[in-house]
Amino acid sequence: MNVVWFKRDLRLHDHDALFKAISLGKPCLLLYILEPSLIEDTHYDDRHWRFVYESLQDLNKQLSPYGHRLTVIKGEALDVLQAIHQRHEIHTIFSHQEIGIARTFSRDRKIEYWCKNNSIVWQQSPHGAVVRGLQHRLYWQDHWYNYMARSIPPIELNKLKSEQSCLHDVDAFDDIYKQTNPHFQYGGESSAMVTLEDFLTDRHLHYRGSISSPSRSRHYCSRLSPYLAWGNLSLRYCYQQTQLAFAQSKGKQHLNAFSSRLHWHCHFIQKFESESRMEFEAVNRGYLDFPYDIGDSAHEKLAIWQQGKTGYPLVDACIRCLQTTGYLNFRMRAMLVSFACHYLNLHWKSVAEYLAKLFLDFDPGIHYSQIQMQAGITGTNTIRIYNPVKQSQEQDPEGEFIRLWCPELSSLSNDVIHSPWLLGPLEKQMFALDYPEPMVNADCIQINRERLWSWRSRDKVKLEAKRILNTHVTPNSETRQQAKR
Ligand SMILES: Cc1cc2nc3c(=O)[nH]c(=O)nc-3n(C[C@H](O)[C@H](O)[C@H](O)COP(=O)(O)OP(=O)(O)OC[C@H]3O[C@@H](n4cnc5c(N)ncnc54)[C@H](O)[C@@H]3O)c2cc1C
């Protein structure tokens, strides 16, 4: 029989692997493998597996009227596939390419090898418009638009001949993943569709003015990221629906801004696909020996940042909000990274792993590319050192977000809520303020700032910056024309 192996593509629409399997008309096992090594991986948290559980429940709900059901098995992928092969003799495995962390990449290499040795065909469909192993961007832009414009083949579940495996593990998911947490977005294709529709009909009208606000973004940004990250929604479907909504919308400028972000989605994942070592080291090799703080003092600083006790209200509110809800808008994510890497001089990798655990939408491709960009170590992007007080005054002027997540500051006036250290000792007593002093002083910040800027003019950094631009940036139209000739 054939197998459709669901990974980060937990949907039924625009599913090339499923489409190909149905087209063959052969008996087919719909499989999800819950891998212990991924559950234990430093990037993941219970929140992710709960989202996956909800997504699988939703798939089963959609499949059941047709008499189909997913087979969910807990085990390492190769072991599970081997066991299925022993009992059912697999002919072809259909799946999507995974643009993932090193752990999933090496697992896929092993499976590829095993398939070859056992004469099993493994057909991997591309991950949207991302091109495997691409080493330059000459034609990528055109490819992106062509791919996004292509019509989506319908999935005809009535033609699917599904099979069950006797290995079906009923209780693959522990109970903790089965308990809904109302603070988090609910997983599944059905929720994704509702969120998309809701955004395109109404919420997008306030999009541009809300992107940078930690409070307003929660309602007026699309909130599609976890659905795109776990594949409840294909980017192509999302893009095409946006194009359709465009004609009717009274907020075309908002949909334009949204569309360009859909483009960035693939751009960043493509970057990671082309240079996945950025999970472990700076994409610009000129920063490989950047002197980040190490040892006990770095551990202590990291722990304070993780606990949301830095003494900077907006930074602390952001971390606490992420811990409870798994979501934060772009600007606040960038500020958290900047604070940790620029103010505290912590290594970007430790920051990346902790945030991956917290982001419900953790997507390795976007995450690692963004972390390095915000940490200022690409040598190609403008260095942005966010001032948390300025951000707080601009993006949360009334202190609404801070009051919600740092209740110990809720009685402070708008003037001082962004910088409570300005209160005199008497006022602190009056408010019974139980909040730490800022964990880093201005001199330290200045030293870190100067070091980061001076590093950028190093020869190695500049040389690497050129290489990065040649690999990851779409050349101008003249260069593209020349290449076509
Ligand atoms: C340090 C850092 C780490 C990040 N890690 C992730 C991650 O792991 N997963 C993730 O999906 N996003 C990540 N982002 C990008 C961005 O913050 C989120 O995609 C966005 O906040 C999600 O909210 P939304 O769906 O409402 O976005 P919207 O503004 O509504 O955008 C729609 C979609 O476009 C894509 N998108 C938006 N902004 C970006 C961007 N700057 N880069 C790439 N794609 C973008 C996302 O898929 C998003 O869902 C990161 C940003 C930073 C600064």
Image (spheres, rainbow, N blue to C red):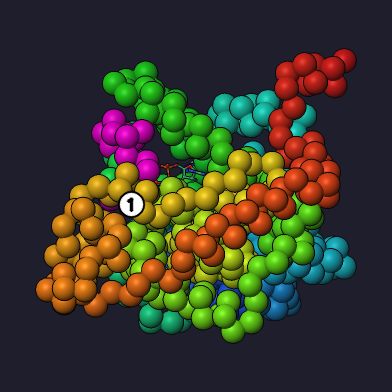
Please state which of residues 98 and 5 is positioned toward the viewer in this rendering.
Answer: 98
List x then y, in percent, for residue 104.
68, 66
**Circle 1 residues within 10 Å: few <14, some 14–19, many ≥20:** many
**Residue 128 visible in image:** no
- Does the magenta run of residues contain 212? yes
Q: Is residue 216 left or right of residue 349?
A: left
Q: Which residue is mark 1?
A: 392
Q: Who's the residue at 30% across and 48% down the image?
A: 393
List x then y, in percent, for residue 325.
34, 64
| Residue 463, placed above or below residue 364 | above
**Residue 210 visible in image:** yes
Quadrant placement of the C terminus: top right
Q: Who's the residue at 68% across and 44% down the image?
A: 270
- Farthest left residue? 430
Q: Which residues are magenta?
A: 202-215
| Residue 456, placed above or below residue 435 | above
